[in-house]
Image (spheres, helix red, strand yellow):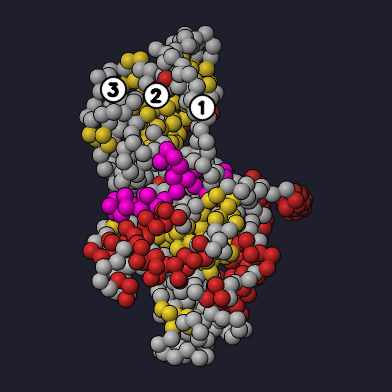
Amino acid sequence: MKHEYFIRKFTWIFLFLTCIIIIAHTDPLPNDDYLHASGNRILDDQGNEAWLTGINWYGFETHINVAQGLTDRNYKDILNITAELGFNVLRIPLSLDIVYKWSQGNGVSPTDVNTTVNPEFTGKTSLFIFEAIITHCKNIGLKVILDIHNVMPGQNEHPLWYDGSHPVSQWLAAWRYLATRYKNDDTVIAMDLKNEPHGNPYKTSDFAKWDGSSDQNNFRKACEDASSAILGINPGLLVLVEGIEVYPEEGFTWETAGEYNFDHNWWGGNLRGAGDYPVNIGSYQNQLIYSPHDYGPGVYSQPWFEGSFNKDTLLNDVWRPNWFYLHEQNTAPLLIGEWGGPLEGDNLTWMNAIRDFIKEHRLNHTFWCLNRSSIGTEGIFTGGNWESIDQDKMNFLKPAMWRDTEGKFVGLDHQLVLACHKPDYMDTHTNITLVNGGSIITPEPTPEPTPVPTSYYYGGMKVLYKCGDTNSSTSQIKPQFNIVNTGDETITIGGLTVHYYYTKTGVMQEVFNVDYAPMGSSGITGTFYDGYMEIGFTGSTGTLSPSGGETGEIQLRINRTNHEPYDQTDDYSFDPSKDTYEEWDHILLFLDGELVWGIPPGGATPAPTPAPTQVPTETPGSTPEQTGEPSPTIGGPSQMQGDVNSDNSIDIVDALLIAQYYVGYTLKTFNPLVADVNNDDEIDIVDALLVAQYYVGILPGLGD
């Protein structure tokens, strides 16, 4: 009888999941962030111009088979900082070998992952890590360009997109696989077909050429074939076509040109052939972007750097004849896929010239690179452990990054604002909270100011505050408060939220702790937002009786994961004079979302709560200075396999969420790191069914 009960219940669950999938397939959430070309500009679906100003993060194309830096920092930390710095798109290089292995069910083992700082990747494959990166980019509004960088890991010298062990058919199959995998996810907006094809017929038998033939090494023809394969699966993607290295001088062909009858440029930078033999992808032509690469004398001393040079000489000698003519003739948009280098000597002269040229013509670009150990170019991250940002380089880059008229950076996502929290390199007057939606929003006329009230005390609730650490410079912010019900109705504590305002500088993650609370620390939650901490209460924390009921003393603590000090001097909610509990209206109290106590900064009614920054748990080895009840893990995702909504239980809701994720729904609460319950590096309907079977007792466990 028990077995029959399980079968009946599982059958109901299976039918229910099937209905959800049918509904999801017929009415998916819109993927509204895809882009297209119009002349030499990139536009969004609403016809607004989009300016892609991004950066490269390499590693998956190397022998380590994973993004570099995961030995030193958590992957979310690196991505958060990337978005916080204002980059709106991330170019990720891959090898053909790793993508093809992924497509064949081999997740590939990474070699350089520190599971102390990335515990979610313990025992996981490169494909799993790649998926986690894409998912977090989605969560923070950071778009992605995928680039097949080389054929075999680390072999950047090979000039072509195929070799003896990896035929052209495998390259095309790899692109079909990637296009299919991200068909329902507009986080991935573009495919860079092959990084820096190159070669000179007088120096090597393997070389990339550009003409009207059907030869296997004709990069133009290869790009047409790959574009058709990709866009036949997802017509919303942009396809990026790079240049080659040499092209026959005027009057010569590949067959008649002698050794000295070729025009040369950087690998991937010679697009002269696109004028004679443009890439033709038929009805998909408005998805085509030409993507040259350009570098300075710090990488290699090219002939055009001999003697003195400037922006005008570079334009006439290199940029216009090789690729800028495509912009001038309104043929297609340009995206400079790689440029960068040290800010010194002649290289600085070139860096200033191309940065100003990019800004002047609003050319799309992805800077090289995030990685601290990039030889010859250096990266945005510096230090032996990726612990700091090159502020000089970020200040240099800022003029060539998409910002509105108020200096706010602009993201490419129409639903999410790019995650930004005023990193240290920015001038103090510059607000980098990003404009939502991939287009500049004209602000509404400023209304007449409302007089600032002296208090928001409505007679029913109040907050008593005590400063737990009165030092202006401190590694731990310690607000303490007591909420009092002075009204004549019983108040449910679970309906209360508190806002404590402080100055958030830098890019390090923060930790929230409850050092003491009468109702127990497990009943209190903390969520970080830009400029304040929101403290909430669970439904199990009880009530406040009328006319004097109080929560009692609640002691909190905020610190950075690296314990760098805060400067509390100008913090709105900080008052070092309050060493005993006193009423303090610079701490806001809400009841069921309505403000009932406190004056917001500036006196204005607070804006609706934005999407939170995930709150990490306390770092291993750190010790609270105060004693009390143990601090719980607050705000972080569950690590329980199958518990995708992080409610510390595995049930039918988790199965439904996995099914919805599989068919392309955008989910507000979903932890993909615990969704792959059968460990096959795919999150699909099989995982949903396994969770359902576990829920009804057919399976004894998950993730084995």
The crowding category of the residue bearing disc 1, from other C-alpha atoms within 10 Å (few below 14, some 14 to 19, many at least 20), is few
* Magenta span dominant secondary structure: loop
Quarter of the C terminus within the rendering? bottom right
CA gap, disc 2 and disc 1 = 21 Å
Percent coordinates x, y for residue 687 in the rendering: 63, 58
Residue 347 to residue 258: above or below = above
* Amino acid at circle 1: Pro
Magenta range: 389-417
Residue labelled with disc 2: 601
Percent coordinates x, y for residue 228 in the rendering: 65, 70
Percent coordinates x, y for residue 657 in the rendering: 63, 48
**Residue at the location (42% across, 53% down)?**
360
**Which is more N-terminal, label 1 or label 2?**
1
Q: Residue furthest front?
A: 251
**Which is more N-terminal, label 3 or label 1?**
1
**Residue at the location (61% across, 65% down)?**
179
Using residue 85 as the reference point, say whether residue 391 is left or right of it. left
Residue labelled with disc 3: 575
The dot on residue 445 is 1
| Count of number-bearing discs | 3
Percent coordinates x, y for residue 116 in the rendering: 36, 57
